Amino acid sequence: MLLPGYMAAMTKMFRIALPDGSVREMPEGSTPADVAAAIGPGLAKAALAARIDGEVRDITRPFEGDSNLALITSRDEKDALELVRHDFAHVLAEAVQNLFPGTQITFGPATDDGFYYDFAPAAGRGPFTDEDLPAIEEEMRRVIAADKPLVREVWDRERVRQFFIDHGETFKAEWVMELPEGEPITMYKTGHGPADWIDLCRGPHLASTGKLDPNAFKLTRVSGAYWRGDPKNPMLSRIYGTAWLNKKELDAYLVRLEEAAKRDHRKIGQEMDLFHLQAEAHGSVFWHPNGYIIWRELEAYMRRRLDASGYLEVKTPQLMDARQWEKSGHWGKYRENMFIVPDEIPHASDDESEDDRPILSGDADLMALKPMNCPAHVLIFNQGIKSYRDLPLRLAEFGCCHRNEPHGALHGILRVRQFTQDDAHIFVTEDQLVDEVVEFCDLLDSVYRDLGFDSYAIKLALRPDKRFGSDEEWDRAEQVLRDAVVKAGRATEEFGWEELPGEGAFYAPKLEFHLTDAIGRTWQVGTVQADTVLPERLDANYIGEDGQKHRPVMLHRAIIGTFERFIGIMIEHYAGKFPLWLAPVQAVVATIVSDADEYAADVAAKLAKAGIRVETDLRNEKINYKVREHSLKKVPLLLVVGKREAEEGTVALRRLGSEERQLVMSLDEAVAMITAEAVPPDLRR
Ligand SMILES: [Zn+2]
Ligand SMILES: [Zn+2]
């Protein structure tokens, strides 16, 4: 007989280190949930999952050895949301199979605002529709209310395959055979019984369906999606949902969606007559006069800021030979996104019969429209001998680039195929790197504030798995960017400072700058990357103080990203109500009676002479009608004139969206006030 003491001595104990530095001894077989319970009932209830040595795991999955443990609660919003959304996807799939027997399951990941699941509807049933959603939501609530445990089981591949074949799940059975043989596969069961719902899944999951808030999700829409994204495969039915940690978050999100729809740049762009898009030029914008005024003002502003910051502006070719793109590495890494153009030699014959000749012979050399400006800037750098005294050399270009993207990925002017970047490349010595990045951070900060964005986050995207360059080079490049943000005083919570493993470009780590707009959405626009690869590939060098050749480092940087997308973001941020200096039409002089027509023309002439973009509205319409129409077009200032104003030399000024009554002032006063207000922010300092 074994004595109890002996038993205890035989039990293996694991050392579990907690974030506060304390260590708990836990017997083999215990789980993070046990640790949470040992700390207190509050934490036991709040804990959703566990981070073990950095990896998110089920809270009920036993420790496998000494571990670092951080318990995840709803306060760890990012992790918690991802877990919850993935759970909702499982609950959705279970609910659909409960309601619609014969439906096959495929994949169902978490998304940025919720989740989706792709189903193959039962034979003869046809795709799901929006009408199915309320019933599915109700069934999901029932699954949640049943508070069923989500149980992780490890199976071998053959067992998984057989299981899915037995259950008529041909998609899953196909997929599992592509997982590496011999590796254990995890299956997640909702419930403990043999007939409970089960899915092949890497996990992790919450402990039970009851951890989900049944009022924190909403199924939003249904669309078609090909099995594994391939049009040759069967079409599946994809059900989308949005999911949050609680109802309050869901409601706030739905309000934000509604607000976003009101601000949609495509809708406002039409109301303000800014631009249009059409199928004959997929992903390229037709800028109308009003829209192009915003562009020109923004470009002029950026140019002044760059000029004042020591940049030199250049212009480089749209088309370059394929061999050049091979050298830069784009042909290998980026070709599928490039527009290729054959360099045909035009035939200059007058002989009319020659018209029948094919225009394209098929054996011409290839050229490509530039997808980025970087190689061209190195080619400029490489002209003539550069000395360390020439550095830093800042070459800027409002570079028009083309990138081929699938039509489905395009979105208004936010995602296009022809775009103009506020691009620049700064060639520096290693010693100048940190200071140059600090200077860039300062410039960018000031630009964002001038353009009306007071809040933005800075992220450092670290080395991806597939990359050029040695680990030492990456260590150094990442450290430079980190040091610069610290030196700029912005590696703080206020600036949302965060490092993102694996998200850097293949040739360099990058700092990303994410703007927060008026309704709390974030947009990545700015970036800076420290690159040693391209200068190497294109053999850029300078003569150092030692008289020897050295490689410069190349900083790729952009502040607003592209004009198209940034103007789209501004339209939505301002809901079309641009600050005066950017507004396409800054003022309209509107008459109340036709007696004031002549005076209205004088007022407009005076404003125009002062450089204000002004129009008159002399139509024989009620003033309220005119006010409504110009506010729909988001004209910031309306100067109303009638007989009295004409006699007294005054105007009655109304501001767009202002509750205040109109302000009566003398014409001279009004002109002085408006011209002062229309000065771009950088020219006021
Ligand atoms: Zn799953
Ligand atoms: Zn670049």
Image (cartoon, grey):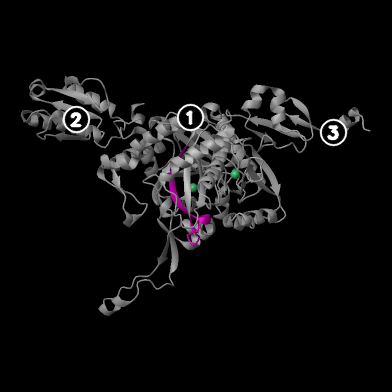
Q: In this figure, which residue is indicated by the disc labeled 1?
A: 247
- The yes-or-no answer for disc 2 within 8 Å of ligand 2 is no
> Image quarter for residue 364?
bottom left
- Using a 10 Å C-alpha cutoff, classify the residue at mark 1 as few (fewer than 14 neighbours), some (14 to 19) or many (20 or more): some
Picture coordinates of residue 674, whole percent (x, y): 24, 26
- Between 331 and 25, the residue placed more toward the observer is 25
Q: Marks 1 and 3: CB-CB under 8 Å? A: no
Kindly state the secondary structure of the residue where label 1 is placed: helix
Q: Label 2 sits on what residue type? A: Val
Callout 3 amino acid: Thr
Residue 254 vs residue 473, the one in the foreground: 254
Amino acid type of the residue that numbered disc 1 sits on in the rendered structure:
Lys
Marks 3 and 2, the one that precedes in the sequence? 3
- The span picked out in magenta is 218-235
In 3D space, how far apart are the residues under numbered discs 1 and 3 (Cα atoms)? 45 Å
Q: Which residue is mark 3?
A: 11
